Amino acid sequence: MGGLVAQVAAAEPGLFGAALETWRDWIRVEATSVVGGRVVCAATTAARTEQVAAAFEHSGWEVTARVSLDETDTHAATAALLDRKLWGVVVGAGGPPRADERAQLGELCRVLGGVAERRPELVVVLSGGALAHAERFPVQRIVQAPAPEERPSFAPSPLRDLAASLAAERARPSSTGVPLPDTRLGFRTSIASLAALIERRVEGVDVGQAGGARVLAGPDGIRGHIARADCGLVARSHRGQEDLLDDVLSWSPIRGDSSTLRDRIRNLRLFPWADASGDGARLRMAAARAALGRLDAAWHAVSVSPDLVTTPPDLLVAAGGAFAVAPPAVVALALLDTLRRPGAQTFYYDHARILGPLGTLEDETDRRRLLADLLDDALLPLGSGIISSQLRPGKQAGTVRVMSAAASAELELVPGAVQLVDLPPGIAATAELEMRETGWAGIRTRRVAVDVTGGLGGLLVDTRGIPLRLPERPEHRREQLDAWQRALWSGGDA
């Protein structure tokens, strides 16, 4: 902070005046990104265990094991609880429990309680009807929790809210000894405040070093939110590390030895800013795409309404260090590659990383006022994107005409391609798609007009399929990814 103040003072000597000596006494917001801990989730049945695990996984926790009496033996359950990095165990049941649960809860809690007795540092979260067996566990480490949802969703729920608050308690303390607020929860709140402020449907995605989050909000409040520990730039996981590395390599346009590239990805987790140019930046964006892909899969898995995941928002805000080293058009393309929905949407980037801290302010009026004041500077306009799929290959697929007050442009649609139209920041335009055959651009039509907004990355017209299909052979996949990205990277420093 001191270094930042010194740089600003050097650039604008008269900005602070005499107040420069007292900057440490100014009101400021402190927040941090919370790293979720490891938990074991248990219930009498595998279905109930999955409900409990979903609530914690979607709140940023890493579920290292799922224990159920119908699928897990006693030895496996005991082994899962011996993990020295384990934060606690979550025992779930209905509220009230079903008859078959009541008959078996005692046996489950007897097994888990025996291990917890020998590990007094473990926190025991008793959800729903499991609280009736609290005497099986050390009383000083018990946390009471509501019952899990019968069908997990990305909408807020009592158990998920509790899981998020337990994660927030793991934050490093401030100078006063109180845990710092969690920026991911703050990001969720800021997106809701932004949606209410501009009266639009706003979606936010945050991919950082320790995890990822996604939130959808409208003027009436939050529609859905998830935070995942396995959706970080290079996810930390007790299992499946090779699969996670394969996910990154599947998005990489870089040619090279597989072992060397895997080591570079591991180094990205250890030293995130050490390799941030050239091929390092491209590898970083491959990791960002893999994280966004996992985030999108988790989002679809818990969606209760197809409309919430297939209809593009009015505004999509990206945040997190994963996107800091790429040109704006490359970031916009990464969002189009992974969060695929037909229609038009506008992209922004929280390059100043203020949405998370601002969301930790308790007063909604203060938060909206600051957002209104800082909006033009805080959110970097990446541009807009249009996805029109199901166009069959052919010489004359159709045209797109982009018209604004400043100029107009027209180009032929190329099926299965990404085309860039120069549309500067602040320019509002109308894009008219006229297709030879019926296509899919949010509605089935041959002609559609959508409003778009310019940005540093211009306007991307995407006629690839939904979902995006990449070649199976690694060399062909790299060539295809490179063909889509090459022209966009050439406008940046990487």
Image (spheres, rainbow, N blue to C red):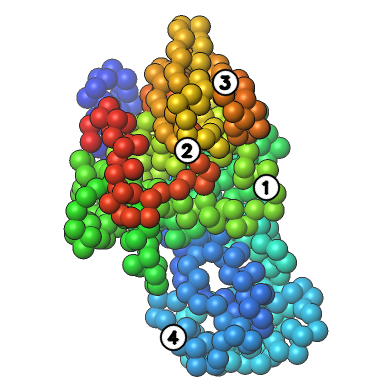
Which residue is tagged 4? 82
Q: Is residue 111 above or below residue 47?
A: below
CA gap, disc 4 to disc 1?
41 Å
Which callout, 3 or 4, points at the residue further toward the start of the chain? 4
Q: Is residue 291 above or below residue 310?
A: below
CA gap, disc 1 to disc 2?
21 Å
CA gap, disc 4 to disc 2?
48 Å
Image disc number at residue 464: 2
The answer to whether residue 65 of the structure is visible from this angle is yes
Which callout, 3 or 1, points at the residue further toward the start of the chain? 1
Which residue is tagged 1? 306
CA gap, disc 3 to disc 1?
27 Å
Residue 196: x and y, percent? Answer: 65, 32
Q: Residue at x 50, y 77 (%)?
A: 65
* Element assignment for label 4: loop
Q: Is residue 321 above or below residue 111?
A: above
Residue 88: x and y, percent? Answer: 51, 76
Residue type indicated by callout 1? Pro
Residue 490: x and y, percent? Answer: 25, 30
Determine whether label 3 and label 1 are within 8 Å by CB: no
Which callout, 4 or 1, points at the residue further toward the start of the chain? 4
Q: Which quadrant does the C terminus fall into? A: top left
Q: Nearer the viewer, mark 3 or mark 4?
A: 3
Residue type indicated by callout 2? Arg
Q: Is residue 50 above or below residue 351?
A: below
Which residue is tagged 3? 434
Which callout, 4 or 2, points at the residue further toward the start of the chain? 4
